[in-house]
């Protein structure tokens, strides 16, 4: 009962704080994301009171209910029919940024194994287990990050380090992308790119037939069905992702906005339960891992900027695509609005596309990484 009380107070408290329109509180959440706060609160409470719920039955609810629910709802929020309004060149630019995020750590590890055999890129080799959750976070957001954390079996201490560094770098990156998009016309002219016309409009309004109750009931039924058919967690992830995509694009009364909000709440639930296994004293920090993340992120931007020049795509799409990958559905539209508000729906679509594909990119990284480290 005690862990459920802590869990409930944590999730409900964070949701309540998130609804308050206080400037200082919004600035706090800019630097300490709600998912990180949900992870830390149970750990701090248990640490101060000397409680240990790392093996409590509450953890089975995370793996069997909340993670599957987050996967289905997130995937079902993507509208495939609306992607054509973005255009193939911005989409290619976006996917090039995703590919760099997924493949750069593999290239870096391969380089070290070829040219410096016997040496480690990080002081602690276990930091490689933190790479797949970062790939999931930078492409798919919190849902993919949590799934990849489970699949990679990333130690809690390293996962906390990943969360802290991720929050720091994403906030700094958002500031840089704000500055970049504001100067995109000048950079466009400097690179000799002539493309400037906005893409076609995207209708963001929900359909007249959107039905929240039906959406929730179908999601619940899909999760129960998948649990009876699939025992392996990795297989469940793939099946639930494909099922969510199918449901969201075939049921006319599907409420995508509601599904996305449900996914956000379930992510908080998963993080709050994970916090019971965290020991603050296990937190570790590796300077070489931090600089590895910086090079990784800067390279992601450089690749997309180069491809924008090759494809003659307006430079504004580079920070938009980057924030859709790295920042997610909250920051991508905000950065886009600093340049052209008419492009905000396209930023939302790219962010949802990122959430839908992040788990698969991360699973690719994890599979190849595991084979390289054997």
Image (cartoon, grey):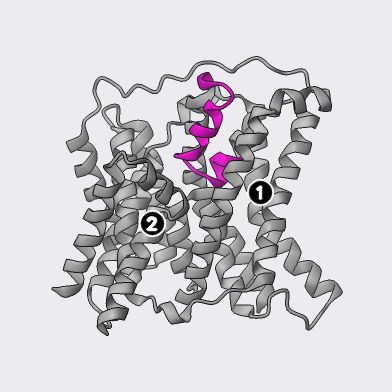
Q: Position of residue 209 (x, y in %)?
A: 24, 23
Q: Is residue 53 visible?
A: no
Q: Nearer the viewer, residue 124 or 242?
A: 124
Sequence-wise first label, 2 or 1: 2
Left or right of residue 214, residue 100 in this image:
right
Which SS type dominates the magenta stretch?
Answer: helix
Quarter of image, res 238: bottom left
- Label 1 element class: helix
Residue 99's tag is 1
Residue at 58 percent of width and 18 percent of height:
199
State left or right for residue 209 relative to residue 291. Answer: left
Assign the C terminus to one quadrant of the image. Answer: bottom right
Q: Residue 65 colored magenta?
A: no
x and y percentages locating residue 288 in the rendered image: 69, 71
Is there a contact, CB below 8 Å, between mark 2 and mark 1? no
Give the side of residue 16 with respect to residue 232, left or right. Answer: left
Q: Is residue 341 magenta?
A: yes
Spot occupied by residue 212 in the image (x, y as percentages of width and height): 21, 35
Badge 1 local density, few (<14 within 10 Å), some, or many (20+)? some
Rendered image quadrant of residue 36: bottom left
Quarter of the image containing the N terminus? Answer: bottom left
Using the numbered discs, state the Cα–Cα distance from disc 2 to disc 1 in whole angstroms.
25 Å
From which residue to which does the magenta span run?
322-342
State which quadrant residue 255 falls in: top left
In the image, what residue occupies the spot 50% across and 26% down?
A: 344
- Crowd rating for badge 2 (residues with CA inside 10 Å; few <14, some 14–19, many 20+): many
Q: Residue furthest front?
A: 24
Kindly identify the residue that appears in the image at 38 percent across and 32 percent down.
249
Q: Which residue is mark 2?
A: 35
């Amino acid at each position: 009962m005690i862990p459920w009380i802590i869990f409930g107070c944590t999730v409900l408290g964070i949701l309540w704080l998130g609804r308050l329109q206080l400037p200082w509180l919004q600035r706090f959440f800019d630097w300490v994301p709600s998912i990180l706060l949900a992870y830390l609160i149970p750990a701090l409470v248990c640490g101060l009171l000397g409680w240990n719920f790392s093996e409590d039955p509450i953890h089975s609810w995370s793996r069997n209910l909340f993670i599957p629910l987050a996967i289905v709802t997130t995937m079902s929020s993507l509208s495939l029919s609306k992607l054509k309004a973005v255009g193939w060149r911005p989409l290619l630019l976006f996917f090039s940024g995703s590919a760099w995020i997924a493949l750069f750590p593999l290239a870096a590890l391969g380089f070290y194994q070829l040219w410096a055999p016997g040496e480690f890129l990080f002081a602690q080799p276990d930091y490689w287990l933190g790479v797949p959750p970062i790939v999931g976070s930078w492409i798919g957001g919190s849902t993919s990050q949590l799934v990849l954390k489970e699949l990679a079996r990333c130690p809690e201490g390293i996962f906390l380090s990943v969360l802290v560094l991720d929050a720091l770098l994403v906030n700094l990156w958002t500031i840089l992308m704000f500055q970049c998009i504001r100067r995109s016309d000048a950079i466009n002219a400097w690179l000799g790119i002539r493309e400037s016309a906005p893409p076609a409009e995207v209708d963001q309004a929900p359909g007249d037939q959107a039905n929240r109750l039906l959406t929730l009931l179908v999601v619940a039924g899909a999760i129960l069905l998948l649990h009876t058919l699939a025992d392996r967690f990795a297989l469940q992830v793939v099946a639930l992702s494909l099922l969510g995509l199918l449901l969201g694009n075939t049921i006319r009364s599907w409420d995508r906005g509601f599904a996305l909000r449900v996914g956000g709440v379930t992510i908080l639930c998963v993080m709050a339960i994970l916090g019971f296994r965290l020991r603050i004293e296990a937190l570790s920090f590796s300077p070489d891992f931090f600089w590895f993340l910086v090079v990784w992120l800067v390279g992601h931007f450089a690749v997309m900027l180069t491809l924008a020049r090759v494809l003659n795509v307006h430079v504004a799409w580079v920070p938009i695509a980057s924030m859709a990958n790295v920042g997610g559905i909250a920051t991508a539209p905000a950065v886009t609005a600093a340049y052209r508000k008419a492009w905000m729906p396209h930023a939302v679509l790219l962010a949802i596309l990122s959430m839908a594909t992040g788990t698969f990119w991360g699973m690719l990284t994890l599979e190849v990484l595991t084979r390289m480290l054997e």
